Image (spheres, helix red, strand yellow):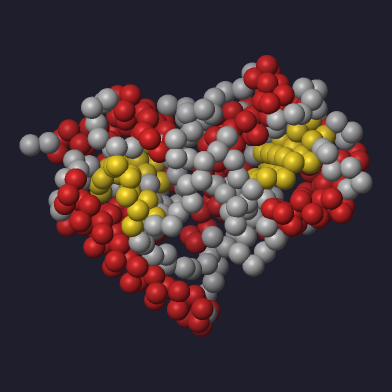
Amino acid sequence: MSLAHELKAQRPSCKIIYIGLKGEKVEGLQNQYQVFDQVYHIAAGKFRRYYGQSFLAHLGDVKTQALNSRDFFRVIKGLHSAEKIVKAVKPDVVFSKGGYVAVPVGLAAKLNAVPIVTHDSDSVPGLANRLAGRWAVVHATGMPVEYYNYGRSKTVYTGVPVDKRVRPLSTSLQRSYKKKLGIPADSLVLLAAGGGQGAQQINDLMLAAAPKLLAQFPKLYILHFAGIKLAGQMGVERVRELYHRLLSDSKRVQVLDFSGEFYKYSGAADLIITRAGATVMSEFAVQGKACIVIPSAVLAGGHQLKNSQVLAAQKAAVVLPADVTAGRLLKLTSNLLKSPAKRKLLAKNLGSTAQPQAARKLAALIIEVAEKSLP
């Protein structure tokens, strides 16, 4: 959406058509969706594979194979829908951010001779962009081009577009965010977030560490995003219930599932415990945040592991192993909360990687490709 707003700013007359996944959750985003001239949702399929899983183990995973077989037909259905849309709207360019929908839409673009621009936020290109990107005229990247195996002549480093409301923080702005969240201005704020769907591991680690942290730091407040969906695992209500059981006074803990104003919570934080997703790390970079990163070890392609390696090399975050214990996380978190100087250095190093003009660069690139395709 930040890219869409920038496209409109640079070319007010441009028409933007968004194609999303059928059934995707867009609660709280309807007003923001108004930037799009048309919105479509199509079927698409996911190819499930898990980082570190052997080929034989993958073949023997009956449930995964069954789901992959089912989703193959969803891709075929999505291709039919995508081609109808592409033929109807006759786009000058198709932009692929990756994800399930990118495959059928990318194929439809290729079949109709529409130029494709891809963008990868992570240091490892996703499978969808590797497929659709075979026909791309330009590959935009969220990290410097040396991390990608695309042809250098077709690769452009733009950075990762972030929510336009995300901006560098001043002391007064951070205090204003705390005030809006009902937190005292002189408090310490620890934010824990495992992504939109949450992370069972981070939920468990926080439940184990929180009682000791709150006892050790009387001015500490915890903002815990437990996720909107944890299939077969504990959801946000269960996490809240466990905090109430563990703490005699849980007023200094806010447990949330999702927020369309996440930037306020991250802006209020003095320290963040997070996964290693490229987009959220780009937001934290713009805000200049001290982060403890616990990458997921099972996501396909191991992209979070490689993202975290990049962060560690730049000393832009404290990176812990995927199997970190609650005791180790507690000790490290405590040490950082005690040391404003260490937090400031981490924030400075991560902030130096920020690309606040990413949306502007990417929009200009897309417009350039679109104009070249005009008759």
* Residue located 39% across and 65% down the image: 45
Q: Position of residue 186 (x, y in %)?
A: 80, 23
Q: Position of residue 72 (x, y in %)?
A: 35, 71
* Residue located 88% across and 35% down the image: 217
The number of discs equals 0
Furthest-left residue in this view: 375
Judged left or right of residue 84, residue 148 is right
Q: Position of residue 44 (x, y in %)?
A: 36, 62
In this rendered view, identify the residue nearer to me: 370 or 159. 370
In this rendered view, identify the residue nearer to me: 373 or 342. 373
Judged left or right of residue 187, residue 322 is left
Q: Quadrant of the N terminus?
A: top left
Position of 182 relative to 191 (above/below): above
Furthest-top residue in this view: 172
Q: Quadrant of the C terminus?
A: top left
* Residue located 63% across and 51% down the image: 227
Position of 84 relative to 147 (above/below): below
